Image (spheres, rainbow, N blue to C red):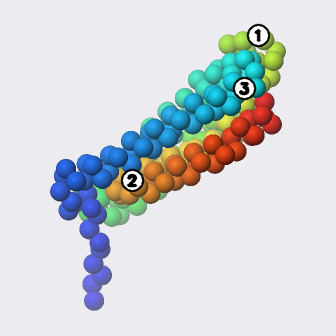
Amino acid sequence: MQEMKKENKMGVMPVPQLVLSMSLPIMVSMLVQSLYNIVDGIFVARISEEALTATSIAYSAQILQIAVAVGTGVGVNALVSRRLGAKDYDGVNQAATTGLWLTLISSPVFVLWGIFGTEIFIRQFSQNEEIVELGTKYLRICQIFSTGIFLGTLTQRLLQATGRTFSSMMAQMAGAVVNLIDGGRFLRRVL
């Protein structure tokens, strides 16, 4: 007996309904991502002006990390969704595997930068020793644990490519809730 594969909603759902059902969770996810930085900024500003300056400097390095992670994820997303549309399931698996390998190759670059290059980077923007110390501590943690960002971003984009935008949104919401609940305490310990 031949096993039938369930048709992806992107191939059978009417376009207006599909656009609405897929775009709303993605918009909410983007809003949540923006709120991460706002909430962190509020917590850090309560610590000191130097702490806020340090995290602001570190943010420019984080943008590069996010650009690589999201760029990889979006590329894999486009390739997976095209292959799904063509019903090339071997190609889908190959694209997802390649995306995983790209993630596992690129994230160690940021981990190594976190270990060896953060202080040099922060010193390019400030000679204030307190800002350098706080920025180095903060950025080092962000870079050393960047593999989580890379894997999370890839996973979210794979979910989006397969039409599971609600699951992607819920994963990001879980991270936001944890950040809201414990973010301030963590940042106070770090900074």
Q: What's under tag 3, amino acid-wise?
A: Arg
Helix, strand or loop under label 2: helix
Residue named by callout 3? 46
Which sits in the foreground, 148 or 41?
Answer: 41
For marks 1 and 3 on the same chain, the one whose residue lies earlier in the sequence: 3
Q: What's under tag 1, amino acid-wise?
A: Gln
Other-residue count near label 2 (Cα within 10 Å), few / some / many at <14 / 14–19 / ≥20: many
- Extreme-top residue of the structure: 127
Residue named by callout 1? 127
Quarter of the view holding residue 96: bottom left
Other-residue count near label 3 (Cα within 10 Å), few / some / many at <14 / 14–19 / ≥20: few
Q: Quadrant of the N terminus?
A: bottom left
Residue named by callout 2? 165
**Residue 181: x %, y % from top left:** 67, 46
Other-residue count near label 1 (Cα within 10 Å), few / some / many at <14 / 14–19 / ≥20: few
- Extreme-bottom residue of the structure: 1
Q: What's under tag 2, amino acid-wise?
A: Thr
Which sits in the foreground, 184 or 109?
Answer: 184
- Image point 45% across, 44% down: which residue? 29
- Image point 34% across, 56% down: which residue? 163
